[in-house]
Every structure is written in structure tokens, then in C-alpha cells.
Image (spheres, helix red, strand yellow):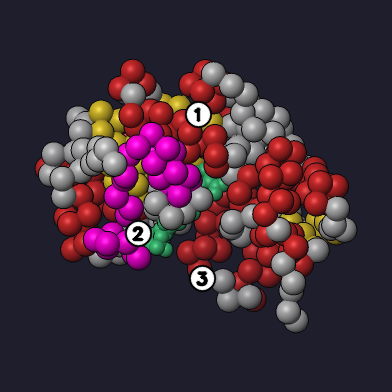
Amino acid sequence: MNKQNILVIGGTGKTGRRVVEQLKKRGIEPRIGSRNASPIFDWGNKDTWVNALNGIEKIYVTYYPDLAIPGAKEAIESLTYLAKELGVKKMVLLSGKGETEAEACENIVINSGMDYNIIRASWFNQNWSESFFLDPIVSGEVVLPMSDVLIPFVDADDIAEVASKVLLEDTYNGEIIELTGPELITFRDVVDIISKVSKRDLNFIEISLEHYIEGMKQMQIPNDLVWLIEYLFSHVLTNPKNQLIVNDIERILGRKAKTFSQYAQETTKTGIWNQVVFQ
Ligand SMILES: NC(=O)c1ccc[n+]([C@@H]2O[C@H](COP(=O)([O-])OP(=O)(O)OC[C@H]3O[C@@H](n4cnc5c(N)ncnc54)[C@H](OP(=O)(O)O)[C@@H]3O)[C@@H](O)[C@H]2O)c1
């Protein structure tokens, strides 16, 4: 295989795994950055970074769990500095659309002197099948606040196709790319679509953000995750800039972005929403 010395940080995650697949389709075998890869890359242990970055020319960076959390800026700053020192030429950073807190991280990459792209994505479809909203769907009951906020959910397949293209093609260097899906839908719509497409009864219950956060604390979800969810609901979802559709997927890929229904049809076929729940 043609080695292009590309590191995909979070290369087994929602977008990183798909970026790796896209690169492999083009005959490129990227290095994966994760706590389970070899060499190991651990955001929590800087000693692991040099080996992971050694000999690398381009990096796709996903930060875990989110660029908006306290400590992310320092981590991105250290990684960017080290990457430049070790001869990395280009960074493609995955960020959140309308996440003011993440902009400090974006600016570090923008001002690094390396080639770069910032990919600002809206909420992923895959949050309903590979992340925090999967369990409620499997259980048959989705309890959420803000049921009527319009969200342009975007598909991780589309994000990965864009990310791998701009990693490989220098014509996009220096662009901030905004990725949304092709339609604005609410949490209620999402649950309806998944219910219809997967032919499962799903119950949607609206609660206040205050009660939702209280419930998470009672379930002993770690404080930083509770903080993140509260931040995403109270600042990101409600930001009017996030309730707009952008056509960067079409511009860069020359095709339409995936709809939520298409995603639901593909995901139904995997059987992930039909897992048996043991009580
Ligand atoms: N979800 C959304 O709707 C959304 C929307 C916009 C932007 N974003 C952005 O997307 C980014 C996350 O990207 P993603 O969803 O593709 O990734 P993800 O699925 O959240 O991340 C999982 C990946 O991160 C790795 N990982 C976890 N903890 C790690 C650690 N301490 N050190 C090194 N690697 C670690 C995991 O591998 P190991 O477990 O093996 O280490 C795995 O490869 C965040 O920065 C977020 O701001 C998300």
C-alpha cells in the first residue's frame, strides 16, 4: 500500500474510522491515533505523542470528547506545537459548528503556520447509533429537552469523505469548511423517522433541560460529560447560526448530503437499533 504518512487521531471513532476507510480505498494506509493503537496515542499522556507523530506529514484531528471542554485548548496547543516541530505539514481539525468555545482551538491551528482545514460540523446522525442517543432508541423511550429546535444533522460518512478529500488535495488549504445535512429537523422528527423506518414503536417524552441535567447527575454520569451536554443544549443547539443549511458537502463532493431518512434506512439494516435490552 502507498504510505502517505497520515495520522488519524480518533481513527476508530465515529468520523476517524470512516476517514481511515476512505484513505484505504485510495490505497493509503494511515496510522491510527488511539489508546489502543500501536504506537499508542493518548490525549491524557503527552509522552505518547512523539512516537505517534514521528514521520507523519498530515493529521486528521478529532479531540475526545469535545473541543469545547476545559483543557482542550491546552491539548490542541501542545499537539500543534509538537506537530510543527516534528515536521508535520498539514492539520485538518474537526470542530463543532457554532461552538464558540471550540474557536480558541481552531485559531491555534489557523495561526500555526502549517497548512490546515477547519471542519465545522453540526450534530452527527451517528449520535443516534454510535453514541449517547443509541441507548434511548434501543430502550424504546427517548426523553429529551428542546424537542422543537431545528437541527441540520449531518452524516459522519459525508464528514469523512470531505475530510479525506481535503487532507489529500491542497486546493482547499486554509478553508474553514462548514458541514450540515440537507434538512432542518427536530428531535421529535428524528424519533418519528427512526420509528417509521425501523418499524419500531418509539415513545418521545419532552422534559426541561433542568430535569434532564438533574437526571444525568443522578445516573452518576461524569461531571465533565454533564457539563458538555448542558453546554451543547444551552449554547450550541439554540445558536441561530446552527439552524442554517450550508452547501459545503455539495460544493466539495459534487453530490448532495445524506438525508436523515437515508441514514436511518442504512442503520436499520445493521440491526443496531434492534438489540435485546436485558433488564
Ligand atoms: N457528535 C457530534 O454531534 C459532533 C458534532 C460536531 C463536532 N463534533 C466533534 O467531533 C469530535 C469527536 O470526533 P468523533 O465523534 O469522530 O470521535 P469519537 O467517536 O467521539 O471518538 C472516539 C475516538 O477517540 C479515541 N479516544 C478516546 N479517548 C481518547 C484519548 N484519551 N486519547 C486518544 N484517543 C482517544 C477513541 O479511541 P480509543 O478509545 O481506542 O482511545 C476513538 O478512536 C469532537 O471534538 C467534537 O467536538 C462532534
Q: Amino acid at mark 1?
A: Glu
Q: Amino acid at mark 2?
A: Ser
Which residue sits at x=64%, y=64%? Answer: 213
Residue at numbered disc 2: 34
Between 205 and 126, the one nearer to me in the picture: 126
Left or right position of 76 against 243? left
Which residue sits at x=51%, y=71%? Answer: 222
Asked whether the residues under the numbered discs 2 and 3 touch, taking CB atoms below 8 Å apart as contact, a structural biologist would say no
Which stretch is magenta? 15-41
**Residue 62: x and y, percent?**
40, 47
Residue at numbered disc 1: 178
Residue 114's image quarter?
top left
Rendered position, 134 above or below 23:
below
**Residue 108: x and y, percent?**
28, 38
Q: Disc 2 versus disc 3: distance between alpha carbons?
A: 21 Å
Residue at numbered disc 3: 222
Instruction: Identify the mark nearer the N-term, 3 or 1.
Output: 1
Q: Which disc number belongs to residue 213?
A: none
Q: Amino acid at mark 3?
A: Pro
Secondary structure beneath disc 1? strand
The image quadrant where one finds ligand 1 is bottom left
Q: Nearer the viewer, mark 2 or mark 3?
A: 2
Which residue sits at x=42%, y=37%? Answer: 25
Quick check: is the Cβ at mark 1 less than 8 Å away from ligand 1? Answer: no
* Callout 1 crowding tier (Cα within 10 Å): few <14, some 14–19, many ≥20: many
* Callout 3 crowding tier (Cα within 10 Å): few <14, some 14–19, many ≥20: few
Quick check: is the Cβ at mark 2 less than 8 Å away from ligand 1? Answer: yes
Instruction: Identify the mark nearer the N-term, 2 or 3.
Output: 2
